[in-house]
Image (cartoon, helix red, strand yellow):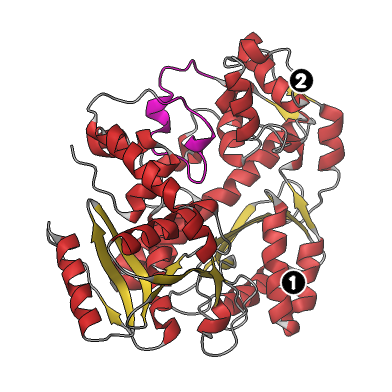
Amino acid sequence: MICKLSKSKYCRGYQCPKMLWMDNYKKEEQTPMSNEQILENGTEVGELARSLFGEYVNIDRPDDKNANNIMAEKTKKALKNNARIITEASFQYNNNFCSVDILKNYGNYFEIYEVKSSTGVHDIYYEDASYQYYVLTKAGYKVTKVCLVYINNNYIRHGDLDLEQLFNIEDITDIAIMKQNEIESIISHLSDVVENEEEPHNKIGIQCFNPYKCQYWEYCTKSLPKPNVFDLHSTNTHAINITKKMEMFYNNKITYNDLEFDDLPNDTLKQINHEIHNLPDEIDVDHIRDFMNTLSYPIYFLDFETYQKPIPEYNDMKPYQQIPFQYSLHYILEEGGELYHKEYLAEPNEDPRRKLAEQLVKDIPKNVCVTAYNMGFEKGRIKEMAEIYPDLAEHLLNIRENIKDLMIPFQKRDYYKKEMQGSFSIKYVLPALYPNEPSLNYHNLDEVHNGSEASATFINLGKKSKKEQEKTRTNMLKYCGLDTYAMVKVWEKLREIIGER
């Protein structure tokens, strides 16, 4: 098989040559990943950035098996017509192809601008842009400048979008030139790998996660015993991050038995020991009681759903800001009282924050006990709304000041079960507390099963017909409602432990 590279294929091969081989020979082994929204973000940012330098000519990609050739010919024609700005300008050299996001044409020399939807520069971006420099210069074009264009996360929208403020531009010409010999060597190596039908025997390593988690991770680790070092969790993420796990793996610390007496965080050792020795549940009743005494009636259970977009849609919005569009609220007014529920879901295609904030202060009185699971998230969103709506700020901040975190007993391991697998996320805690309970199983929901799906669903809600919207809204409300109902069930379990009913 001839190795034909595009800039994306080159970057995948740069991360791991076996990844590129798998793409060509065993693509069916990919584990699906929910990266659709990431791709949409990239498309949205790329299309907006085309206007960064004024009028442009775009080279559309046709639905044709010879698309690369067609785009390269269209680019040559645009250059002959002296188009100053060409987007998706396409070039070929041997079996290498690239489309430049933005090409500045000065007649006898050119500038490359590679657009990214991130808010910072990652090492792989240098490889991407440097590969483009390689293709263009080998094809006979003089390139005098190579730049990365990425999102400025300090930009706050006021009025019309200011593209010059929205985007940062970083000149990386020197880096691109420096990498040319390396790129030629990498291309040669990737060609050797792909042209060999025998599967490479690359060892797993940090490249499996850097810069992106590989979709073939499950395939490449299928022979490892389960559970293994890569299944470990810890509240101290720095102590047990992927680099640490790889280090243990290469020191033959793979199974939990290998790790039993290692110098690891206490909560990780607890996970290991519970798995190996099938230990009974650990319950610190006194600590749980101390926590429960911080809660009082009336008690409210709050959960937000949010979305992020790279391009701020409305005033007082930053790139990738978490924008709340939905909440669920279960509440009990008094000891032994009835469980009530309120909820809010914004309409699509409008700034959801004001109406949500107004409804929230109607639904939650001042000076009441509010719980959230991982409260930093809800507190952060409430603070942001208070900052842009001064007339609601006092009430919003009162709600924020009275939020308690239902996650604490699990984060501190005051309550631990083997089934929690070392995690204190509610997605692990809930099924551990209530196994085989269909009403608490997120997999039994329709359409929306997690926060990422809720976000993507809301972003695309306005594209649906009214009938489709009604069905989807029902599914979104069920999902968010389960989030707070799950919190109620967790709270009830903690009450049982300390002897309250």
Q: Please determine whether, in this image, residue 326 is positioned above or below residue 425.
A: below
Mark 1 highlights which residue?
396
Residue 25: x %, y % from top left:
23, 33
* Disc 1 from disc 2: Cα separation: 44 Å
Residue at 59% of width from left, 14% of height from top? 252
Tell whether label 2 touches label 1 (CB within 8 Å). no
Q: Nearer the viewer, residue 358 or 379?
A: 379
The image position of residue 64, as x and y in percent, is: 12, 61
Q: Quadrant of residue 380?
A: bottom right
Q: Residue at x 53, y 86 (%)?
A: 162
Residue on which the image places disc 2 = 263
Residue 245 lies in the magenta-colored region = no
Out of 385 and 396, give the one closest to the viewer.
Answer: 385
Helix, strand or loop at disc 2? loop
Q: Is residue 232 visible?
A: no
**From the viewer's perspective, is 291 left or right of 248?**
right
